[in-house]
Amino acid sequence: KAGVTQTPRYLIKTRGQQVTLSCSPISGHRSVSWYQQTPGQGLQFLFEYFSETQRNKGNFPGRFSGRQFSNSRSEMNVSTLELGDSALYLCASSPGQGGFTDTQYFGPGTRLTVL
Amino acid sequence: AQSVTQPDIHITVSEGASLELRCNYSYGATPYLFWYVQSPGQGLQLLLKYFSGDTLVQGIKGFEAEFKRSQSSFNLRKPSVHWSDAAEYFCAVGARGTGFQKLVFGTGTRLLVSP
């Protein structure tokens, strides 16, 4: 099976712009989670979706949003970009209903740079 | 609040030598514990996990970890390190709260393997 794919792999934006990142889970997986990875804050959980519904949400401002489509593909959106949003954004899919007891398979990430 | 501490930022080990990466967690209930590895330019890969039962857990790539409740530790070990093990290693704990569950990651330990 193909792994989790994330597009684009690299992205450069300027402050104030918005960005949309895409994640295609492993075939058959219905749960998708998003994480932000920065040198300063490390890996932080953003949100999790299952069957098009947000199941869990981390402590991020409302500028960060996401959604999941009926084919389980997911997008996350960041509006009004700030310099501190520069990070590697990781997507993970899992075969069950999500939650940390469900093994997560990570994609390679999207590297976002905000100038 | 749930937290994970990885006290070693960098560790250098000679190829063929044994390895132990330290992880301490803070969690009120029975913890769900994980070790992930991240190679350069890659997403995270699950090495092993502990939910309950035998406190010595075997994982992929010859890794094992031991859960010690009395020490709140979940250290990762490998008897003989290979150059391909050079990567960043993350310990994580599954955290639950009102209306959410998520993985809380440590800050990571970068493993360097010398010839």
Image (cartoon, rainbow, N blue to C red):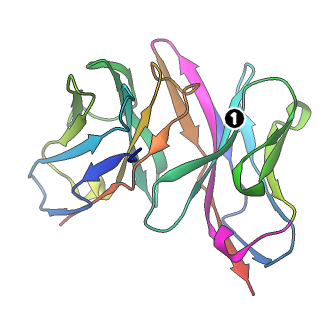
Q: Is residue A74 left or right of residue A95?
A: left
- Judged from this view, the residue extending furthest toward the bottom is B115
Residue A59 picture location, percent across and down: 39, 32
Q: Residue at x 30, y 17 (%)?
A: A51
- Judged from this view, the residue extending furthest toward the right is B70
Where, quadrant-wise, is the N terminus of chain A in this rendering?
Answer: top left
Amino acid type indicated by mark 1:
Leu
Stretch in magenta:
B80-99
Q: Is residue B93 magenta?
A: yes
**Dot 1 lies on which element?**
strand
Q: Is residue A54 left or right of residue A13?
A: right
Q: Is residue B40 magenta?
A: no
Residue carrying label 1: B33
The subunit letter for the residue under badge 1 reads B
Residue A45 picture location, percent across and down: 43, 37
The picture quadrant where one finds residue A102 is: top right
Q: In the rendered view, would you say A13 is above or below B86?
A: above
Q: Nearer the viewer, residue A58 or B51?
A: B51
Q: In the rendered view, would you say A54 is above or below A72?
A: above
Q: Residue at x 46, y 54 (%)?
A: B43
* Camera sees residue B1: no
Q: Residue at x 84, y 76 (%)?
A: B16
Looking at the rendered structure, the number of numbered marks drawn on it comes to 1
Residue B58 picture location, percent across and down: 80, 43
Q: Is residue B111 left or right of residue A60?
A: right
Where, quadrant-wise, is the C terminus of chain A in this rendering?
Answer: bottom left
Mark 1 crowdedness (10 Å alpha carbons): few <14, some 14-19, many ≥20: many
Residue A103 picture location, percent across and down: 55, 33
Q: In the rendered view, would you say A9 is above or below B101?
A: below
Q: Residue at x 35, y 35 (%)?
A: A27
- Judged from this view, the residue extending furthest toward the front is A1
- Judged from this view, the residue extending furthest toward the top is B98
